[in-house]
């Protein structure tokens, strides 16, 4: 018989159906047996009575066994509804259950047995040791909370795709194996077997590629980009993460901010109606004001920080383009100039002459903007330097020699000099946004297979050693590890 999804069985009252999924809860009551059956779309109660041969099989079933169940869809009576209510109160489950019907089971087919899980699947695992959860992530992801986190992530991503498509954007992929260039965080590097002693880098972001797409005449691009940065970890940071990355030609700061604000409002109003946006349009705070008033550039401006459904978006604007590096051994010593966002930004129009002439460097204000939410930076972007000479001047201020500029960024200068339009964009930290929307404490709760706090994936035991044969093929030799003192 054709499979019926649990979410659709309410319209099958009086009919015989077959559902396939997992045993969520099994309750043996002597002459009767009750089951909560689960598939990806919902849960429903099943009951076995009056059929000794079926009841005999039913008494052997255990949670997480995979079964095909055939039975009659009946309307729930008062007694079973009361039992269900008590079960709801006991387990804390709610809307995932189909409440108005139950299945009178006439046949079981066992599709796969399961060992007893290391934690309860029909309860939240939020308080379970995270290492245990990550080691058994395929079990953790079966829980209702984690299923909901991933399904809402899908819905938000789909809404973004649909909206950006309507706005004329084209979804394009950029390379994962790319070139190591000095842009910020430490790169992950990959040895190139066919080019001995040379390496690819995994992308920290698609920054250069999306600007090259503007050079190509695409005008409006986006992607859900995988980004990799070898940096110290924390609750809102992972070695690999996802950005909603977009770029637009012939636009101003205002154009970009307005489009992104509309999209964020649309996400909340359509997918999170229980949440309230504190202020629309989103307030705007200068970098200087944020640092003076809040002590950081990602201010939490919520009126009530105890309200988990209050969302306080805020734009932070008018960032200084450059800042001096600090010597950890001598904080008073003057360091070199570095960028506050990335080296491909443009200054405000009134500061372009200073940028070109390398004058009053500390006073140059960038055409940059961050979007923050409840104390987290969830996105950042800028209008870009689309003139090759301007970009070359910026890189020179940052201390790059002409030779190094050509070696590391010659492709960008050549592309910009080919007739590149004014352009700008933004990248959202998609994992951080989902973490906040789902009221979770870390981005690991909204990523299917995250790394732990030490950058390891316990389930796959990664990173791991490779064979000597692989090292030989890559012309690599490993130095002995230093012994800890």
Image: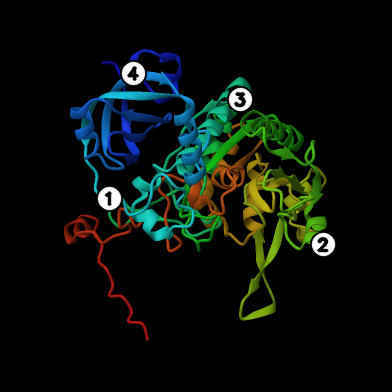
Would residue 185 appear left or right of 54 to someone viewing this image? right
Label 2 belongs to which residue? 292
Q: Earlier in the sequence, mark 3 or mark 1?
A: 1
**Residue for point 60% across, 28% down:** 220
Q: Which tag is nearer the camera, tag 2 or tag 4? A: 4
Of residues 375 and 3, the one drawn nearer to the viewer in this rendering = 3
Would residue 114 appear left or right of 363 to someone viewing this image? left
SS of the residue at dot 4? strand
Gap in angstroms between the C-alphas marked 1 and 2? 56 Å
Label 4 belongs to which residue? 72
Of residues 263 and 449, the one drawn nearer to the viewer in this rendering = 449
**Residue for point 38% across, 46% down:** 121
Label 3 belongs to which residue? 163
Q: Earlier in the sequence, mark 3 or mark 4?
A: 4
SS of the residue at dot 3? helix
Q: Which tag is nearer the camera, tag 3 or tag 1? A: 1
Which residue, as the protein is rendered here, is positioned at the far bottom? 485
Q: Earlier in the sequence, mark 1 or mark 4?
A: 4
Q: Which tag is nearer the camera, tag 1 or tag 2? A: 1
Q: Earlier in the sequence, mark 2 or mark 4?
A: 4
Residue 116 image label: 1
Gap in angstroms between the C-alphas marked 2 and 3? 37 Å
């Amino acid at each position: 018989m054709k499979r019926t999804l649990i979410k659709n069985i309410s319209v099958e009252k009086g009919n015989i159906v077959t559902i396939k999924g997992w045993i969520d809860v099994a309750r043996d009551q002597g002459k009767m047996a009750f089951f909560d059956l689960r598939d990806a779309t919902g849960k429903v109660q099943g009951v076995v009575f009056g059929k000794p041969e079926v009841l005999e099989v039913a008494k052997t079933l255990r949670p997480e066994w995979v079964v095909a169940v055939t039975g009659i869809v009946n309307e729930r009576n008062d007694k079973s509804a009361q039992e269900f209510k008590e079960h709801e109160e006991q387990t804390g489950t709610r809307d995932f259950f189909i409440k108005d019907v139950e299945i009178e089971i006439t046949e079981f087919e066992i599709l796969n047995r399961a060992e007893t899980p290391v934690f309860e699947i029909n309860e939240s695992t939020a308080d379970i040791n995270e290492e245990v959860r990550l080691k058994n992530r395929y079990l953790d992801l079966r829980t209702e909370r984690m299923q909901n986190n991933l399904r809402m992530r899908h819905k938000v991503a789909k809404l973004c795709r649909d909206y950006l498509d309507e706005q004329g954007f084209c979804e394009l992929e950029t390379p994962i194996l790319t070139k190591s260039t000095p842009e910020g965080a430490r790169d992950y590097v990959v040895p190139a077997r066919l080019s001995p002693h040379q390496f690819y880098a995994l992308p920290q972001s698609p920054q250069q590629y999306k600007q090259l797409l503007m050079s190509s005449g695409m005008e409006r691009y986006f992607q859900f980009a995988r980004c990799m940065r070898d940096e110290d970890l924390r609750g809102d940071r992972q070695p690999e993460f996802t950005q909603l990355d977009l770029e637009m030609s012939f636009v101003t700061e205002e154009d970009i901010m307005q489009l992104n604000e509309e999209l964020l409002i649309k996400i909340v109003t359509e997918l999170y109606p229980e949440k309230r946006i504190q202020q629309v349009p989103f307030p705007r705070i200068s970098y200087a004001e944020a640092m003076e008033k809040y002590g950081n550039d990602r201010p939490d401006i919520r009126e009530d920080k105890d309200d988990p459904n209050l969302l306080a978006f805020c734009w932070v604007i008018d960032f200084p383009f450059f800042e001096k590096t600090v010597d950890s051994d001598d904080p008073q010593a003057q360091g070199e100039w570095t960028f506050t966002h990335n080296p491909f930004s443009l200054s405000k129009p009134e500061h372009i002459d200073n940028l070109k002439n390398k004058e009053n460097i500390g006073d140059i204000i960038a055409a940059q903007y961050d979007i923050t939410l409840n104390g987290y930076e969830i996105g950042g972007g800028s209008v870009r330097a689309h003139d090759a000479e301007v970009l070359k001047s910026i890189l020179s201020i940052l201390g790059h020699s002409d030779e190094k500029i050509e070696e590391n960024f010659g492709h960008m200068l050549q592309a910009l000099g080919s007739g590149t339009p004014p352009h700008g964009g933004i990248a959202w930290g998609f994992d951080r946004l989902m973490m906040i929307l789902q009221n979770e404490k870390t981005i690991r709760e909204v990523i299917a297979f995250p790394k732990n706090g030490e950058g390891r994936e316990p389930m796959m035991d990664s990173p791991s050693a490779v064979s000597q044969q692989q090292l030989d093929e890559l012309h690599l030799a490993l130095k002995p590890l230093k012994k800890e003192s």
